[in-house]
Amino acid sequence: MKQRLSLFFILLFVPLFNFSEAKVLEQDESNHSLSAAKLQKQKVDAETNIKIISFNVLANRSTWSERSNGIIDKIRDLNPDIAGLQETMSTQRRDISNALTDEYQLVEFDIPVTYGNPILLKKDRFDILGSGFVDAAECGNTRYITWLLLRDKSSNKEFHFYNNHFCVRSSSNSSQAEHVIELAELIEQHQTTSSSGTTAIVVGDFNATRNRTIMRYLLDEGTITGQLSPVQLVDTWEVVYPNMSKPSTTERDAAIDWILTIPEETIIDASVDDSEGFSDHHPVTATFQF
């Protein structure tokens, strides 16, 4: 009798054990599928993320031979998809372009000044659909806004990219005002006349901290000569770190280098790096999710 009962209980629990084991296997397969899907999404997101930097490399020809490798290595380490560069003299542009030519294209503009605002692009990432420059202000020499209309090959998204180097504030407040008004009007013109959408990314050395008139004009609906900006932008640093003051972007303890965009864009990261003494400005970065 005891032997029959033992056999009965064995027969009773064997199916239950197999059923439980099957459920565990099924759950493992489900978790594996979810993990694979998550990894695939992360891969797609990474492919459509765009890293931007703005970097004033310091237009000092006499020290360039000592600084060039440091500047070029810094750009390599940051690995931007697009870099707006300021204060690049002809020798500096040549050396940066030659050193990074395997991966990057340095777009230069036919600007009649000692240094322009070239834009560095990853060769295989973008199509250039349009380009240009406009006179922005005078302060001993003409300051220009350089721009590109780009198509991102990964997301197929089109956007305008603007590179700036504003006059120093002490030279003329009116020069900064002229520049920022020209910038805002150029962005508005592109937004209203282009069939490519309204996305704008604005970078540069603005020679202005967050509380200055030109920054309030772009970011806070401040006015210049009683007029509002025709476009409103956001600071990428403030989007990512709304409760944290932006670190200094220069050796002079002032945050004056900026990456701005329209409010509708998704920014997932922002930083102020360290130029390690190779420039008097630090590179600022922002990563967009297209």
Image: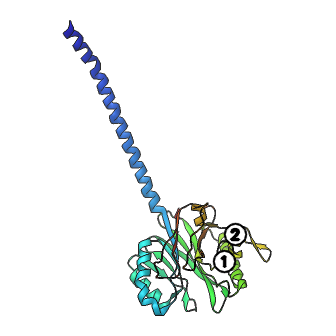
Quarter containing the N terminus: top left
Residue 104 seen in the figure? yes
Residue tagged 2:
231
Asked if residue 288 is positioned above or below residue 146 in the image, the reply reads: above
Q: Is residue 236 above or below residue 91?
A: above
Percent x, y for residue 98? 40, 84
Q: Which residue is mark 1?
A: 183
* Amino acid type at image mark 2: Val
Q: Amino acid at mark 1?
A: Leu
Toward the right, the furthest residue is: 226
Of 71 and 278, which appears nearest the observer? 278
Tag 1, which secondary structure? helix
Is residue 259 rendered to the left or right of residue 224?
Answer: left
Res. 17 image quadrant: top left
Q: Position of residue 43 (x, y in %)?
A: 42, 57
Above or below for 8 versus 275? above
Horizontal side of residue 172 vs 42, given as left or right? right
Q: CA distance from mark 1 to mark 2?
A: 10 Å
Q: Residue at x 24, y 18 (%)?
A: 10
